[in-house]
Each structure stands twice: as C-alpha cells, then as structure tokens.
Image (cartoon, coloured by chain):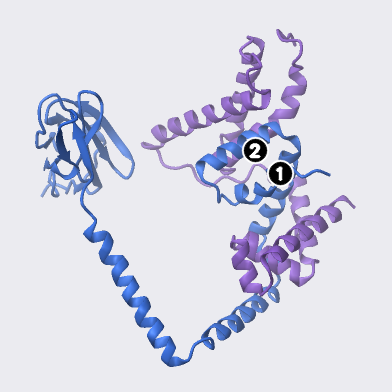
Amino acid sequence: MIECKYEGLIDRYLLNKMGEGERNEFEEHYFNCASCFAKMTERDEVIGVLKREKSVFAAEVRPAIETRAAAWHDRVFAFFTPKQWVLAGAAAALLVAVLTVTPLLRNAPPEFVLNGEETVRGSSLTLISPVIDIHAVPAYFEWKKLGEDVQYQVSIYNGQLLWKTSTTDNTVSLPDDIKSRMIAGQKYSWQVKAFSKQGTLIAVSSRVQFTVNPAD
Amino acid sequence: MTNSRPEIDLDELVLKYRPVVSFRVRKALGGATPDWEDVADEIITQVIEKVKNGEFRGDSSIGTFIYTITSRRIVDHIRQRTKVLRHAPEPSAFPDPHETVENRERSEQIAEIVKGLKPKFREVLYLYYYKEMPREEVAKRLGIPARRVSERVNYALKLIKKSLKK
C-alpha cells in the first residue's frame, strides 16, 4: 500500500505540534484524502484513550522508565570528573550571563519611517493618562501628539481586547457602554499605535497597565 | 433533493464530508464546547446551499471548497463567541458528546488491549503520546535509536487495530 506523504504528520497534528501554516496545509489535505482522514480518526481515538485512561500504563511501566532514566543520568554524570564539571558549570554560567545581557543591550525600540524622510522611533509615543492606578473609570485617554496627519489606533484591554478605536486627535473619550463595563479592582491596560497618512505603522507606545481602584 | 450540478451527488457529499467537517470543528472548538455540533451542521447546510447555487465551479477540489467554508465559519464562530463570552461566564465543562455508550465500550476495549501489550510497547506509547515527548527524547530515555521508537509506536498501533477488528 502506498503511503501518503502526509501520513507521517498525523501525530504532529493530533498532538498540536504544528505551526499555523503546516496545520492549514494538513487540514486542507485531509479534506481531500479519505485515506489520511480515516487513519487520523483511528489514531485520534487511540490517543484519546491513552490520554484519558492513564491507568492503562500500569505502574510497572512508569517506574521502569524512571529507573532507566536514572541510569541514563548516572552515565551522564560519570562523563566528566568533578573538576571538569566545575569548569563546565562556570562556562555555562558565563554563557547564561552573556545571553541575558546581550538582549538587554539590543533592546532599542524599532525604527519606523515617516514620509520616507523623518524617522520616528517606536518609544517616542508616550502615554500621558491614565498611567497609574486611578479611583474612577477614566473619562478619556491621552497621549503625546506625534505630528500632523497621524492616525492613532487606541486599544484597551482587560486580559483581552475590550475596545479599539481610531482617531487623529491625541485624546479619546470612552463611550458610556465601555465605561459601564469597566469594573473597580480589575486590571486594564492600554496601548496606542500611530500610523502615517499612508497607513504605515510609525510608532507603538508601551502597553501601560492601570487598575480602577474602588472609590474611598 | 434537487441538484443544479449533476456531477455532485449531495447525499454522497454529506455522507462523506460530515465526519471530516465535524472532526475539524471539534478539533478547533474542543469537544467540550457544547455547540460544536451546531456549527458543523451549519457548515454542511452552507455547503449544500453553495453547491446548489452553483458556487462550486470546480476551480479547486470539492474537498478544498468545503475546507475553506469550514475554516471561515470556525473563525467567525470563535470571534462571535469571544464577543459573547466577554460578558458571560465560560460554560461549565460539558461531557464529551463523543462519549456515547457505544464509544465508551470501544474506548474500554482499546484500554484493555493497551493493558495487554508488552511493556516495551506500553512505555513507548506512554512517553510518546501521553507525555508528548519528541521521538528523539523518547529514544534517549529508552536508550534505543529514534527509528526504533517510530517502529515500536507503529507496531503498537497496528496491534491495537488488529485486536479491535477481532
């Protein structure tokens, strides 16, 4: 029986190990390949049972695996002498330090080009209010103006997107229905993105968190 | 059932694609989502209507045509659900609708078969499917070549399939 080249991907799909592109391609494939679909549903059934019925892996299987893993670790530890392990540890610590510091040094905001000449750095879009915890639902949100002909996209989140709007002004008022949905004690965050007249993203503010504290 | 495109038998189409659409929807929304069956039904109805209206022109395969409708509907459903759920509590866990008596019996049968497998097969199934370890890691843990892991998994699946057919 000729094996379809997608057959080997069934496990990756069922165990959710695929990226979006690969997943879409695979899904389109099984809409067109009855053989792969049949094999996949069969496999899904078995995996479902294995996942639900942990008891099928009788106790003797798991300790056996653990023991073998322990033996494997022993072999690894025996690979170097204690002195060599100390050196390896020091080298690893140095590597970790370098890897931690390097991204911090490179943490410059991205550059966005406005009108092909003027350059606006991403961090220059500064949020003004609210940026700290407040005692009442904010009536408006304000940020520093970037220039003329800039379109701002404001997003407010409560874990997920609560409200999104666009404006050319540097403030925006909250509609009543959104205000009524904002609850005291809950954490919110907001962010502004600036777009040029041509629709190019030119700056992104940081995402600032605030809490509406209950009134005293 | 009338059919504006005689080369497509709608009954056959529904028979063939309902399980495929249902699988895709259940995978995307999760079997615990109570409305996944409604979404799958809506998609099938939409497919029938579109085929009847002659919207399937054969530019792609019928499978791809149905896949596209399915994917769009799933995205719409998730968007809609997100909007609704923003103001409503998440529905409580729902029993897996797939767990009918018949299916439960079959699941028990599979579980029994797995229990009866040799430990070398059970351990590979445990690490590869239950623990979701990559093949290479399973190989390291068991001290066998990666190729051997695939062979054992495939052989174990074959044994399960064979025992189920008996």
> Which residue corresponds to mark 1?
A41
Crowd band around label 1 with a 10 angstrom C-alpha radius: few (<14), some (14–19), many (20+): some
In the image, what residue occupies the spot 43% across and 88% down?
A84
Display colour for chain A: blue
| Image location of residue A94, percent across then percent down | 31, 76
To which quarter of the image does residue B120 belong? bottom right
Chain shown purple: that is B
In the image, what residue occupies the spot 67% across and 65% down?
B146
- The amino acid type of the residue labelled 1 equals Thr
Q: Nearer the viewer, residue A26 or A92?
A: A92
Looking at the image, is B72 positioned above or below residue B55? below
SS of the residue at dot 2? helix
Mark 2 to mark 1 CA distance (whole Å):
8 Å
Crowd band around label 2 with a 10 angstrom C-alpha radius: few (<14), some (14–19), many (20+): many
- As drawn, the label of residue B23 is 2
Q: Chain of mark 1?
A: A
Q: Chain of mark 2?
A: B
Looking at the image, is A188 positioned above or below residue A77? above
- The amino acid type of the residue labelled 2 equals Phe
In the image, what residue occupies the spot 41% across and 35% down?
B82
Q: Residue furthest front?
A: A117
| Image location of residue B106, percent across then percent down | 78, 50
